[in-house]
Amino acid sequence: MQVIYEDNHIIAVNKAVGEIVQSDKTGDPTLADEVKQYIKEKYGKPGDVFLGVVHRIDRPVSGVVLFARTSKALARLNKMFADKTIKKYYWAITQERPAEMEAELHHYIGKDEEKNRAKVSVSQRTGYKEAVLRYKTIGASERLYCLEVELLTGRHHQIRAQLARAGMPIRGDLKYGAKRSNEGGGINLHSRRLEFEHPVSHEQIVIEAPLPDDRVWALFGK
């Protein structure tokens, strides 16, 4: 586990591909439990350690995940996420050339519970919620394109589904139309950066997660 920011009220870690943030039906060990154990050992805390989960990223996705270490921070961060005052930036790699190098995508997203898959519509439907993101192309190699995505709403599988609908499925994401899977089962989507006002000190905080250490991400940065 890689801790990338830590103070008395919040802690942020760089999640690896394949880890789950909170417990699910698999019963696999969670990132939240790992962070709790880290705090318990580092600070010699007896008994249960308080840790608030304020957001999640999908299992095949890597990158920064923010947790609250106090109830005050948890309440305020929950409100900040709900009010969309926390800026969230992701990096995504696609094998398809973007039709536009920079654009804002507007869709409506519903959820297929049986297949755990987002359904995307260009018009409003019953049960669908508005989904908006902005992207810009920040790098290209012979066969790949790297996009920086600013997530303006937080819907189920939003980036994966919207980019696929725009003809740019994320590399390795078979669920949304990628041509083949990645080794290890992950996808090339990385929660790169969070920008927000600290919930207690009110300082401006920028937390950036280093890219996974592999040959594909190495084409576009560290």
Image (spheres, rainbow, N blue to C red):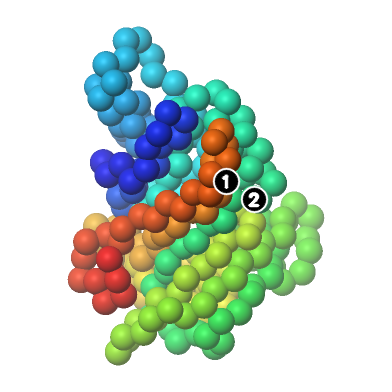
The mark nearer the N terminus, 2 or 1, is: 2
The quarter in which the N terminus is drawn is top left
Residue 49: % across, % down: 39, 19
- Which residue appears at 38% of the width and 14% of the height? 48
**Res 163 visible:** yes
Q: Is residue 175 visible?
A: no
> Depth check: 146 or 25 in front?
146
Q: Which circle marks residue 128 in the picture? A: none
Disc 1 residue crowd, few under 14, some 14–19, many 20+, Cα 10 Å: some
Question: In this orientation, which residue lies closer to the viewer: 8 or 151?
Answer: 8
Residue at 64%, 73% (x, y): give it: 105
Residue name at image x 28 percent, y 28 percent? 38
Q: Which SS class for mark 1?
A: strand
Residue type at mark 2?
Answer: Thr
Residues marked 2 and 1 touching at CB (< 8 Å): yes
- Quarter of the image where the C terminus is located: bottom left
74 lies left or right of 153? left
Q: Which residue is mark 1?
A: 197
Query: Is label 2 in a helix, a strand or a loop?
Result: loop
